Image (tube, rainbow, N blue to C red):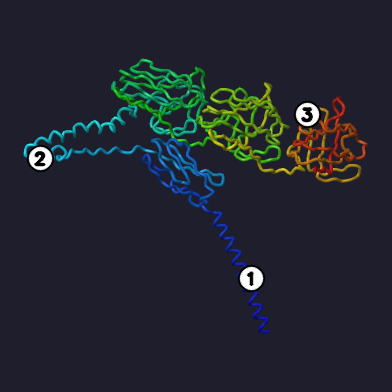
Amino acid sequence: MNYMKKSIKLNILVVVCMVSILFGNLNLKNVDAKKHITLSKKSVTLKKGKTIKVRLIGAATKKVKWRSLNKRVAVVKNGKIMAKNVGNTAVVAKYKNKNYRCSVKVVRNKIVIVPTEKPQSTHKPEPTTEPTYRPEPTVEPTRETEPTNKPQENEKTNDTELEPYQTYGAAEYNKSLQMAGYVYQNSVVYNIYSSSNGNSNYVLYNLDNKYDKLSFTYGHYDGKYRDDCILLVYGDGKLLAQYTDLKAEMMPRNVTIDVSGVSQLKIDCQIASGYAGLSGTYGLSNIKFHEKNSNEAVDISTGTRVVDISEPYQTYGAVEYNKSVQMAGYMYQNSVVYNIYSSSNGNSNSVIYNLDNKCDKLSFTYGHYDGKYRDDCILLVYGDGKLLAQYTDLKAEMMPQNVTIDVSGVSQLKIDCQIASGYAGLSGTYGLSNIKFHEKNSSELVSISTGTRVVDISEPYQTYGAVEYNKSVQMAGYMYQNSVVYNIYSSSNGNSNSVIYNLDNKCNMLSFTYGHCDDKYKDDCILLIYGDGKLLAQYTDLKAEMIPKNVTIDVSGVSQLKIDCQIASEYAGLSGTYALVNLNIR
């Protein structure tokens, strides 16, 4: 009896230990899963040539990939940042498909000048009482060293950032703005409306006739109002320069203007067109004035890149970025989706990238979004305004296509989509996925990856027209499940009434049973089977009084399988209901 009690207690103790160990492990897993990933520093300031170590806290060190957005300013290796040249950039740590950004500012090293007095012993090894008076002129080199102190002053005055003493209208100073994926500080922003035309929208500077050159960067403010504008630069009331290329899809431009003899400088912005209801948002950055009689060049610096090369800095029209999209039964992430309507034709439906002339190849996959609007579209790829490629095969029943395009020498890349036809009332939904840019002088190939399959090979990834999938149906007194049912009408002829499968070129045989649905519409139909657009089989015996028939078809080498059904006669007012059952793909 005592033995049994001890045995029971021992068993209970073992069970308790096992449960505690199990739940302990679960808790540990939960703790790991909830680990917060963050950078040890979100921004750093370095002197040229200095280094600093940044860590991605909570991440497995070996799985973190580091890169610099501007290697001319700073480089990074395993989290160690080295300052190369004066400027602004950012380093990005990529971990589990997420980017963590640290801003980097590189500043000049201060020049410290220590005047050196010549030792008395260098002139006369055996100084007499008189030479003690003579070395004094050799102390005067302190005067000669004065100019070596001035470069630091010149660095500030030769290339100076002045503030406007007055702003008017829809102009604001000392703002931050984003242009082509870069953020600029201390900028002038113009939010211009048609109603403000004729009024002043400007900034005024007092140059005191001290400067001979003005330099600045102008461009469109990403994601803001996009109608065309013009920029006008006046010196003492006289027009010095006029820029008419302020457009929403422009790349930022650097300009230098002669302002010799100018006291009052005025920089004005207006809507380009005289039409009402227009609005544009543009910015001026890196505004610098070059002092007269200086041999220092006017330096145009860039902002800090905040949008990665692989991400669009701007989208227009019926476009969305960073979406998931299903194409041919596969799900793709981080995609561009175009929901295009006839009414949007002529307008831009585009994504725009700033490549900074750093890439030589672009690759992507394009295709129709399963189950969405299905009218034909065209895809247009532009590099700096020049057409690089055009694809006219965007159709609802297409298979996704992989392409690679040469983008050597391109700064601004634009990918636009339009309805192919000029008719009204048309709509199409298409996607771009696996968008990759290949860096120049890199040995890495541009690889095209696929999405994640979410629709089994045995299931259609898309149905069109008068078709239903996964239905129960009765044929010749037998009930069938998981069937394809065609409810066909004369009016639907010429349109697609089909189911579409993505076989991925993995199958060689298709078999199914087809027949009439008992007590349903009974006009004759025909059944058509296509493999990659080629007719594989045709059945013209779909009649109301038929007995269900079994067929087997060779589908070797087929990627896209389409099974379509049409009314056999061209007469109006006819209807037929037929079904496919026991569909087997192997």
The type of residue carrying mark 2 is Pro
Q: Which tag, 1 or 2, sits closer to the chain's start?
A: 1
Q: Is residue 285 left or right of residue 459?
A: left
**Of the pair 463 and 61, the residue shown nearer to us:** 61
State the quadrant of the C terminus: top right
Residue at left offset 52%, top offset 35% = 309
Q: Quadrant of residue 113?
A: top left
Whether residue 582 is situated above or below residue 530 in the rendered picture = below
Amino acid, disc 1:
Val
What residue do we see at 67% from left, 21% from top? Answer: 422
Q: Which mark is residue 15?
A: 1
Does 185 sit left or right of 98 as displayed?
left
Distance between the alpha carbons at the discs numbered 3 and 1: 66 Å
Q: Secondary structure at mark 2?
A: loop
Q: Nearer the viewer, residue 356 or 264?
A: 356
Q: Position of residue 490 (x, y in %)?
A: 83, 28
Query: Which of the two labelled residues, at mark 3 and mark 1, occupies the earlier sequence position?
Result: 1
Q: Would residue 95 appear left or right of 331 to someone viewing this image?
A: left
Q: Earlier in the sequence, mark 2 or mark 3?
A: 2
Q: Is residue 185 visible?
A: yes
Label 2 Cα crowd, 10 Å radius (few <14 / some 14-19 / many 20+) = few
Most distant residue in the front direction? 125
- Real-space CA distance between mark 2 and mark 3, rounded to the nearest whole angstrom: 112 Å
Residue 261, image x, y percentages: 30, 18
Disc 3 residue crowd, few under 14, some 14–19, many 20+, Cα 10 Å:
few
Could you tell me which residue is drawn at 51 percent across and 20 percent down?
A: 276
Residue to which mark 2 is pinned: 127
Q: CA distance from mark 1 to mark 2?
A: 100 Å
| Residue 162 visible | no
Please name the amino acid that badge 3 sits on.
Asn
Which-is-in-front pick, marks 3 and 1? 1
Residue denoted by label 3: 495
